[in-house]
Structures are given as C-alpha cells and as structure tokens.
Amino acid sequence: MKQSRLELIVGVFVLVGLAVVAFLALRIGGGALLGADTYPLKARFTNTGGLKPGSNVLIAGVSVGRVDAVTLSPTDYSALIEFSLRKEVRLPVDTMASIRTSGLIGDKFLALSPGSEDQILAAGALISDTESTVDLESLISRFAFGNVEQKKTPPPAKPPVPEITQ
Amino acid sequence: MSLRFSFRFAAIAMLSVTALHAQAPAADPVSMLRGAIDEVMAVAYDTKATTPLVERARPVLAKYFNYESITRRAIGPGWRQFTPEQKKLTTTLFSELALRTYANRFEVGERPGITYGKPVMLDPTRPALRELPTTIDYAGKKYAVAYRIEQVNGSWLIYDVNIEGVSMIANWRSQLDPVFQRGGATAVIESLENNLTQGPVK
C-alpha cells in the first residue's frame, strides 16, 4: 500500500515537472517571456525572405519584440507580419520596418527605424513604410551575367546574293 | 562595370520620379505618374540641352517632390529637435544633395521601358498614402521600382522610391541618423554642406 502511494506521488511529481517544462518552452518560444506588457503591430511586405514566427524585432540592435505570425494575403499575395512590441516602446506612424539578416547567412529579423511624426502607432496598427528583404542571389545574377545588349556585336555583312536568272 | 551599371539604373529610376511634377497633377495617381515619367524622359534624354541635368531637373522636382516630407523622414526621430530655421535649411540642402547625387550618376543610354502595376493602399486607416509599383525594363533586365506617394492638399507627392526592395528613405536615414546622434542638427547640416561642396555639378 505504502509502495503504491509512493509511486503515485512520484508519478504526479514527474507529470507536474513535465507540464512546467512544456509551459516554459512554449512561453520562451513565443517570446512571452519578454513580458506580458506587449502590444500588437502589423507590417506588410512584398517579400519576407523566409522570416519566421519567433524572429526578433530590433530597434538599434536592441530586441524589443517578437514576430507572432507571417501570413499571405490571398488578394495581392503580399506577406503580412504580425508582431508584438514591448509596451514602453512607442513608435511614430512613419516608422520604417525592414527585414534584415544577421550577417550573410544568419537569421532573419525585423528591424524598426523610428520616424519623426508626432502621431504614435496604436495597438494593432499597420506600419506602411516597409522595406522587404533584398534578394541577393537575384541581384548578383543580374549583374554577374553582364549585359547582353552591350556585348552584342553587329552581325557580319552578308555577301551579296547573286541574282538567279531563269 | 556592374557598380557603374547599378548607379546608372538608380539614376534612371530616380530621375523618372523627377518628372512627376512637370505635368498638371492628376486625380488618379497612376495617370500622373505616366505623364510625369514621359516628361522626365524628355528632360533626361535631351541630348541637345546645354544646361546641366541638375538645372533642368530642379524645377521639375521642386513642383512635385515633397521635399519637407522626404527630409523629415530621412532624418528620422532627430527631426523633432531641429529648430524651424534648421528644418528649412536642412530641407534645402538635403533636396539639393539628393538631386545632385542621382543626376551626376545619370548617363544617357538606352531608354527604359516602364510597366505600371495596380496602386496599393498602404494602410486602410491612412488613405492618403499609396504605393505605385512599376517594372522598369532597362538594358534587357527588369527591375522592380515602387513609388510611395502621399496626398497633400489634393496633390499627390512622392516621398519615397523603393528600388528592388531598397528604400531611398531607409538608405538616407541609416546614414543621417548616426550623424544626428553624434552631433545633433548642427552636425547634420555641416555634413550636408560638406557633401554639397564636393564634386562638380553635371
């Protein structure tokens, strides 16, 4: 009897431990440990370059939030990024959002560059000035393969075709 | 060659914008853009013109570019600490610098073809802002250029140009904001004045 009671207590203890670990993992993954005092914002991009939920939101290199969701608009095929920002960080309406990469092959993050307007973005507002990720591969290929038009040489003059007389 | 080519393209894209105000402002932003670009092409590709391109493009810019908005956005949060006199001077200097930067890199070459996309309302709560996506076909390659415009007193004015995902405002802000952080409005003005004294006007 004592043995089974002890096993039950140990089992409950293990289950509670697992639940706590799972809860913390979810909270950390979702960025909720930044603090419950956050507010949502949105930004629309033509190309997110693979930015994922959970990515950092930085201002001047300082982490101030997390990306919550990245969805595709079915109408214009643009990407809508929803993110949470610390409540004490108030941004002007002309703030610019850019998608950047840590180094050449590092993680993507959302960089915010505050503007100068007096009006402040309200919770749930959309940042209209955005800068999508630069497609380096595409740019390099465009310039690496040169300009076909400039290299085009005039075709050699054709020899005169003799008239065929019947 | 590649760098020179990219500068040439950026200059074409920028100068395409400068035409926007040479025409009477249209109610429809796309119509305005179409007419404007036609006119800027005429100015930029006028091989018989004797006056520098900067001089020819300046009045066009002055009419249709929102200088104050562009400068304010380019400076960033530090703009609030500028005095009215400093704001006025900075706007004049920055506009001239932007014009010279792109005009000096422009070279008369192949005329680009332009395809106009559907205007996009950037934010439903701010209907006075629009983005006009275009595709520029230059020297056998296509480039995405988006013009961001705002309606001010009934006229559509350009406040940013986004070339292949790179914003003109973001580019300038990343350069000018550190200058402001270092030395305030005075440092920004000095920096702009120093830049303007360098290099000849083309």
Image (cartoon, rainbow, N blue to C red):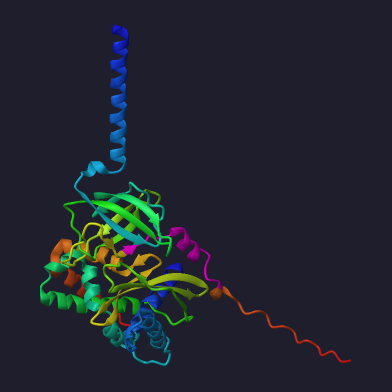
Q: Could you tell me if residue B75 is visible in this image?
A: yes
Q: Would you identify the image quadrant in which residue B76 lies?
A: bottom left
Count of all numbered marks drawn on residues in the image:
0
Seen from the viewer's position, the closer of residues A69 and B76 is A69
Residue A141 to residue B151: above or below: above
Q: Is residue B177 left or right of residue B112?
A: left
Q: Is residue A135 magenta?
A: yes
Q: Position of residue A17 (x, y in %)?
A: 29, 25
Residue A103 to residue B167: above or below: above
Q: Would you identify the image quadrant in which residue A99 lies?
A: bottom left
Q: Residue at x 17, y 66 (%)?
A: A119
Q: Position of residue A44 (x, y in %)?
A: 34, 61
Seen from the viewer's position, the closer of residues B104 and B110 is B110
Q: Position of residue A43 (x, y in %)?
A: 31, 59
Q: Residue at x 28, y 72 (%)?
A: B127
Q: Residue at x 45, y 74 (%)?
A: B136
Seen from the viewer's position, the closer of residues A52 and B184 is A52
Q: Could you tell me if residue B199 is visible in this image?
A: no
Q: Quadrant of the N terminus of chain A?
A: top left
In the picture as drawn, the residue positioned furthest to the front comes out as: A1
Q: Position of residue A85 (x, y in %)?
A: 23, 52
Residue A154 to residue A121: above or below: below
The span shown in magenta is A130-148
Q: Quadrant of the C terminus of chain A?
A: bottom right
